[in-house]
Amino acid sequence: MATSDSTAARQQLNITKEVVALQRMTVSELRLRYAEVYGEPTNGRHKQWLVKRIVWRMQSLAEGDLSERARQRAAELANDADLRTRAPRAQLPEAAIQTKTVLLPQKTDPRVPIAGSVITRPYKGATLEVKVLDKGFEYDGEAYKSLSAIAKIITGSHCNGYHFFRLAKQGGAK
């Protein structure tokens, strides 16, 4: 028993040395080593994957491959298995088939009057007029996404558009 334990220890030591040597190699060198061990080139370029595959193959060659009995059993299992040659078609669940898509009306801010309304505000001796559009606002012939953008154009500094145009919580009511 002592001799078999020491042989196993020496083999383990050799594998450890081999792993260390492989880890020091570049990916190009590992690909060449892979081709030597497997007898065919690889497209793989992941260093750890190459090291693992090379070490596995070296161990397999040194310690022997599967027994003939194991190979026969694997072949039996493969023959008995129902193998698919194509992926199954995607089946929609019944709930998805019965579901209807309904577009909900887009909620607008309750402070903004309905489209077509005109918001007026006296400012520095002039009366400002902003027309409410379906999506945005029109001021001085140009469209804007928000009242704050218009307020910034008018005042030159950022301010809350609802406050600037004095819009209360209920659609322009004060």
Image: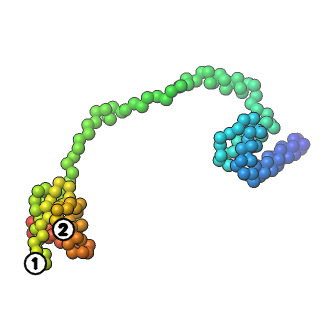
Residue 52 horizontal side relative to residue 121, left or right: right
Mark 1 or 2: the one toward you: 1
- The residue that appears at 76% across and 38% down in the rendered structure is 37
| Type of amino acid under label 2 | Tyr
**Rendered location of residue 96, percent (x, y):** 32, 35
Q: Residue furthest right?
A: 3
Report x, y in % for residue 68: 75, 25
Q: Which quadrant: the C terminus?
A: bottom left
Compared across the picture, whether 104 is left or right of 83 comes to: left
Pointer 2: what residue?
162
- The answer to whether residue 28 is seen in the rendering is yes
In depth, the one of 162 and 57 nearer the eye is: 162
Q: Amino acid at mark 1?
A: Gly
Query: On the image, which quarter does residue 133 sit in?
Result: bottom left
Q: Which mark is residue 125?
A: 1
**Residue 51 circle label:** none
Mark 1, Cα crowd under 10 Å, few <14 / some 14-19 / many 20+, is few
Q: Secondary structure at mark 2?
A: helix
Residue, x 72% and y 51% (percent of image)? 26
Asked if marks 1 and 2 touch (Cβ < 8 Å), the reply is: no
Q: CA distance from mark 1 to mark 2?
A: 20 Å
| Residue 169 in sight in this render | no
Q: Secondary structure at mark 1?
A: loop
In the image, 47 versus 52, the foreground residue is: 47
Residue located at (76% from left, 32% from top): 65
Give the mark nearer the N terminus: 1 vs 2: 1
Q: Position of residue 70 (x, y in %)?
A: 72, 27
Q: Where 132 falls versus 79 (above or below)?
A: below
